[in-house]
Image: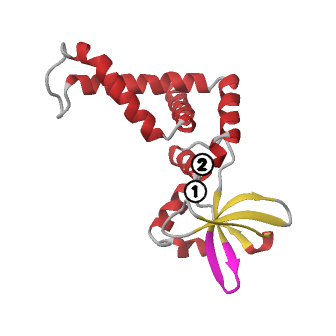
């Protein structure tokens, strides 16, 4: 049972991560829902008129959308599709502002740890500390994105000495949430 749940979770996660780079997830889901409403309308006439405030065509469209995500997840498991999506990310999506941050937050939110995510760090600047996201590091230096609160998708990239970076162990999604609340809870990261 646990392996089936794990398989379903990983497959659905892969489906979401497959759809996200194609265009912004919300746009895809909205377009897919509208299209599936048209397709499902004839079938929905045979369903009850109203369930939980949704008519039959909406329920059928939502079910079809879940199936599309699952099938996309199965496709995403193949190395050929992963390479294609990776190539798309490197050649096109790399230039979309905030895409890398959105992807990291999405991966953290759904619990996907298969790929390197940016992690939340504190960067020392004199007597103060800045909240940032670790992009890459070596023994001597770290590349850090330091966002402008309350937004996590704009800021500046700095290369700083590794000694001035403190890893917090906080996920990207929790770090971004703290930034939208002007750093609330970040003082606990100092310990």
111 to the left or right of 116: left
Q: Quadrant of residue 127?
A: bottom right
What secondary structure characterizes most of the magenta part? strand
Give x and y (percent) for residue 163: 79, 73
Residue drawn at x 53%, y 72% is 186
Which residue occupies 64% across, 78% down? 129
- As drawn, the residue found furthest toward the left would be 49
Q: Distance between the residues labelled 2 and 1?
A: 19 Å
Q: Mark 2 points at which residue?
A: 96
Residue 165 seen in this snapshot: yes
Tell me if residue 127 is in the magenta stretch.
Answer: yes
Answer with left or right where residue 31 lies relative to residue 44: right
Please, what secondary structure does the residue beneath circle 1 have? helix
SS class, disc 2: loop
Let me know if residue 151 is in the magenta part.
no
Q: Give the range drawn in magenta.
A: 123-131
Q: Rate crowding at label 2 as few (under 14), some (14 to 19) or many (20 or more) other CA atoms within 10 Å.
A: few
Q: Position of residue 100 (x, y in %)?
A: 62, 50
Indicate the quadrant where residue 112 lies. Answer: top right
N-terminal-most mark, 2 or 1? 2
The x, y position of residue 82, in whole percent, is 67, 29
Return the residue at label 1.
172
Which disc number belongs to residue 17? none
Residue 60 image-quadrant placement: top left
Which residue is the extreme one toward the right?
Answer: 140
Q: Can residue 191 be seen in this view?
A: no
Residue 157 or residue 126, whichever sits in front:
157
User: Horizontal and vertical percent for residue 132?
Assistant: 63, 66
The answer to whether residue 184 is above or below residue 66 is below
């Amino acid at each position: 049972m646990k392996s089936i749940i794990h398989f379903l979770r990983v497959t659905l996660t892969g489906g979401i991560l497959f759809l996200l780079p194609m265009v912004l997830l919300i746009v895809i889901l909205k377009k897919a829902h509208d299209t599936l409403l048209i397709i499902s309308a004839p079938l929905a006439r045979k369903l009850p008129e109203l369930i939980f405030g949704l008519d039959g065509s909406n329920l059928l469209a939502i079910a079809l959308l879940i199936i599309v995500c699952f099938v996309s997840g199965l496709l995403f498991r193949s190395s050929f599709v992963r390479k294609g999506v990776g190539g798309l990310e490197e050649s096109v999506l790399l230039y979309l502002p905030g895409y890398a941050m959105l992807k990291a937050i999405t991966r953290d939110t759904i619990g996907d740890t298969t790929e390197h995510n940016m992690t939340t760090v504190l960067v020392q600047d004199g007597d103060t500390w800045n909240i940032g996201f670790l992009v890459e590091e070596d023994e001597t230096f770290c590349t850090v994105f330091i966002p402008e609160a309350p937004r996590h998708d704009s800021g500046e990239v700095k290369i700083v000495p590794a000694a001035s970076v403190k890893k917090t162990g906080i996920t990207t999604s929790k770090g971004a949430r703290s930034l939208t609340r002007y750093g609330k809870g970040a003082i606990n990261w100092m310990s």
